[in-house]
Image (tube, rainbow, N blue to C red):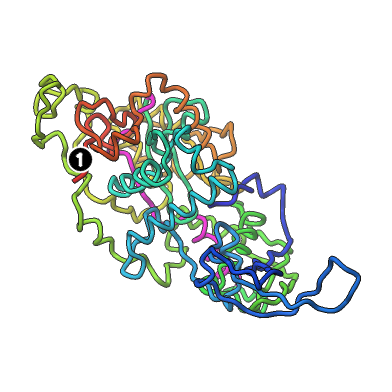
Amino acid sequence: MGRVDGYNPQNTRKDGAFTWTDTHVKDLNSSVPQESSSDKSVIAESLVQNEGTESKEPTLAELKFREVIFGEEALRISPTEPYSLRRLIRRGHLNISQHYPMQQVLEDLHALWDWILLEKLHIPHQERSLYSAILVVPETFDNREIKEILSILLRDLRFSSAVVHQEGLAAVFGNGLSTACVVNLGAQVSSVICIEDGVALPNTEKTLPFGGEDISRCLLWTQRHHQTWPQIRTDILTKPIDLLMLNRLKESYCEIKEGELDAIAVVHSYEDAMPAGSHKTRLTALNVPPMGLFYPTLLIPDLYPPPPRSWFHDYEDMLEETWHIEFPRRSDMPDGLYPGSNVGLQMWDNYPFVSMKPKKEEKVGLAEAITSSILSTGRIDLQRKLFCSIQLIGGVALTGGLIPAVEERVLQTIPSNEAIHTVEVLQSRTNPTFVSWKGGAILGVLDFGRDAWVHREDWIRNGIHIGSGRKYKDSYFLQAQAMCYINS
């Protein structure tokens, strides 16, 4: 669960320290047997002062470790505590590896969403069937991942129905637009996709393997290079709370600006289970880390890069070419509803066919990715419109000076033989950190006929069939007019 304190950090600088998460649950009635997984809890004895009376005699209490901790609290756990930190999504995909199998990732995702629904939204299990879910997914997700997540929503969380929308498309609707080039600047990955008249164009998607966390790590490297970082142990691998501190410093002080950019800031040190220490220091070259968006070689590569995603090939490929496959025909359906029978896909005829394999990452800067994405549309009228309708979303979009930097560098990247002389980044009407969620809600309201919604019984029993009326109409990569998944 991400933080939502995404308002303009240039005007809301925060120097307060983070606090360690309290991992214990106090149980003064320790003699009473516990029914809920007490055999799995780690139990310690401690002396706790009873504040309910004036007596200063300590009361023997039993401290139990909290079995599961979610959200930002999980990032503020001391490394000395007996917990294993699990990140469900990494670099734009489910964090599946040899040591974190897919089934465990999906179970953890179910537990996280269940906790949010119960503790934050107060929707109990017995009322879930009264609700429908809108699933907004990033462009980086593969169909296989979307299918598994959709199964969690309908089968495990027991929503009555669900619909899937791409994050870029939802952001366009969230700002009241219908055509734009959406640049999603996330924590670990950035993506570019063009939207025309409410449809995501299939061959314009670009994925860049860097984001806000890479800028934060670059900030730390830059300060150590200039010897301005205090002599403290800052290790984002073993202490995720240090990454939270670096993210806050980046949001508060980093911006794209010419010349030297220094600032006096308070840096905190977090030693094992001890209160945070404060160190006032002068940070320098604060305009260098965000320039890594345009020059990725500035960014520090992962010490432990994500493993190869060989798991994708272990199961039936959801990205296969469904319109070249013969499916068993149902007697109650006319021939025209089957992919081999002249399905009405005229809207895609002008676009080259994209091989549906796991999406590849581009190793270019942000300006090159935006220019390449827009020019790939192949139509000069649409290209001019998109270059003047660039929309930045995600937490990194709040970086000071980013909008004029994008406009200037994209204009410089356009080839001289292209008759395009204007580049404009549109001001977001909604906070870019969560404009996609607003757009997802709007899309759910606009779909009066609910043609794209998948019902729980249909998904569990049959999956999605050609001609069933349950088609994703907003995304080519979700099999825009002919998505088909048949559960085995």
- Asked where in the image residue 354 lies, by quadrant, the reply is top left
Check residue 202 for magenta coloring: yes
- Disc 1 packing (10 Å; few <14; some 14–19; many ≥20): some
Residue 335 left/right relative to 53: left
Q: Position of residue 241 (x, y in %)?
A: 60, 67
Q: Secondary structure at mark 1?
A: loop
Residue 263 left/right relative to 449: right
Q: Which residue is mark 1?
A: 486
In the image as oriented, which residue stretches furthest toward the front? 32
What's under tag 1, amino acid-wise? Answer: Ile
Q: Nearer the viewer, residue 272 or 202?
A: 272
Q: Position of residue 9 (x, y in %)?
A: 66, 49
Q: Position of residue 289 (x, y in %)?
A: 54, 60
Q: Which residues are magenta?
A: 197-223
Residue 29 left/right relative to 143: right
Q: Nearer the viewer, residue 257 or 130?
A: 130
Residue drawn 65% across the image and 78% down it: 271
Residue drawn 42% across the image and 38% down it: 159
Q: Nearer the viewer, residue 31 or 237?
A: 31
Residue drawn 42% across the image and 72% down it: 303
Residue drawn 75% across the image and 79% down it: 47
In the image as oriented, which residue stretches furthest toward the right? 54
Residue 151 can be seen in this image: yes
